[in-house]
């Protein structure tokens, strides 16, 4: 920007508050999904529009936000495509808790779908750290989520490195291998004669983890494990 133009924008920066949230949000969508998004974020600060457009964001974190936005790659899974609106907003809101994100998105009149994805991305921003050391039961449930393509790009922008291990799993393993059908359900436990209670969820969660980690491979092994757990918990079958 020319100096005179910059000074004029700075002088009138507070006037942006008169513009509707919907209009501002639409412009932000275009700005943040553009390849030059990092430059746009720099200009928000230089023009002194930042505290009016994003009053919730700590300006001390803005330099880091710009660097992360600059590293943000195109999505590579399941197909090559541009970055999405939720992904770019997740970069901005990465330090926020769920309630703060909700208030932010509501102020800008963002869609419920956008809000849901932003919340998920921020909550899982560390889910792919050291993925090659994670158990299947920790990693696979993340890999099968709809937002995994965005999360992979988010992870790369945050760390500066792509997650080659996660990408290899996604490319070489089928959906059924990453998210196999459950071996037993709560209804199965009831049919086996067990009384519903808090232990059901604990057992089924543990069973699912062992199944994903390939410690239990079939229904027969699942039943045997369940019966051993019920015995240890002194949980008799109903007569």
Image (cartoon, rainbow, N blue to C red):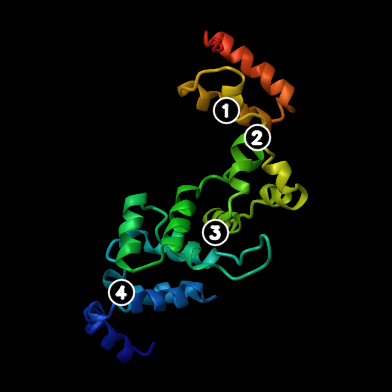
Q: Of marks 1 and 2, which one's residue comes earlier in the chain? A: 2
Single out the mark in the foreground, 1 or 4. 1
Q: Nearer the viewer, mark 3 or mark 1?
A: 1
User: Label for residue 204?
Assistant: 1
Residue at x 46%, y 77% (from the top left corner):
30
Looking at the image, residue 48 sits to the left or right of residue 170; the answer is: left
**Looking at the rendering, in which quadrant would you find the C terminus?**
top right
Marks 3 and 1 sit apart, C-alpha to C-alpha, by: 36 Å
Q: Which residue is mark 3?
A: 157
Q: Position of residue 225 (x, y in %)?
A: 66, 18
Closest to the observer, 222 or 36: 222
Is the residue 46 above or below the residue 170 in the image?
Answer: below
Q: Quadrant of residue 188?
A: top right
Q: Which mark is residue 235?
A: none
Dot 3 or dot 1: first in sequence order is: 3
Query: Disc 1 to disc 4, how far (Cα)?
Result: 45 Å
| Secondary element at tag 3 | helix
Say whether disc 1 or disc 4 marks the residue closer to the N-terminus.
4
SS state under label 2: loop
Question: Is residue 97 visible to the viewer in this orientation of the structure?
Answer: no
Q: Vertical placement of 20 versus 184: above or below?
A: below
- The quadrant of the rendering that contains the N terminus is bottom left
Sequence-wise first label, 2 or 4: 4
Q: Quadrant of residue 156?
A: bottom right
**Mark 3 to mark 4 CA distance (whole Å):** 28 Å
């Amino acid at each position: 920007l020319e100096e005179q133009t910059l000074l004029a924008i700075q002088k009138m920066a507070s006037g942006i508050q008169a513009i509707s949230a919907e209009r501002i949000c639409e412009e932000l969508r275009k700005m943040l999904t553009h390849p030059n998004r990092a430059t746009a974020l720099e200009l928000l600060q230089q023009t002194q529009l930042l505290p009016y457009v994003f009053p919730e964001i700590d300006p001390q974190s803005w330099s880091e936000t710009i660097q992360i936005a600059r590293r943000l790659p195109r999505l590579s899974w399941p197909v090559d495509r541009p970055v999405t609106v939720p992904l770019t907003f997740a970069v901005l809101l990465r330090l926020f808790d769920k309630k703060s994100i909700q208030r932010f998105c509501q102020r800008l009149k963002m869609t419920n779908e956008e809000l849901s994805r932003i919340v998920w991305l921020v909550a899982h921003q560390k889910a792919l750290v050291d993925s090659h050391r994670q158990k299947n039961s920790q990693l696979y449930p993340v890999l099968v989520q709809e937002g995994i393509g965005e999360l992979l790009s988010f992870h790369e922008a945050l760390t500066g490195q792509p997650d080659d291990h996660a990408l290899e799993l996604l490319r070489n393993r089928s959906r059924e291998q990453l998210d196999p059908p459950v071996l037993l359900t709560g209804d199965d436990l009831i049919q086996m004669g067990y009384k519903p209670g808090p232990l059901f969820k604990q057992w089924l969660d543990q069973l699912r983890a062992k199944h994903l980690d390939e410690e239990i491979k079939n229904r027969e092994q699942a039943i045997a494990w369940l019966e051993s757990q019920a015995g240890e918990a002194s949980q008799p079958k109903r007569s």
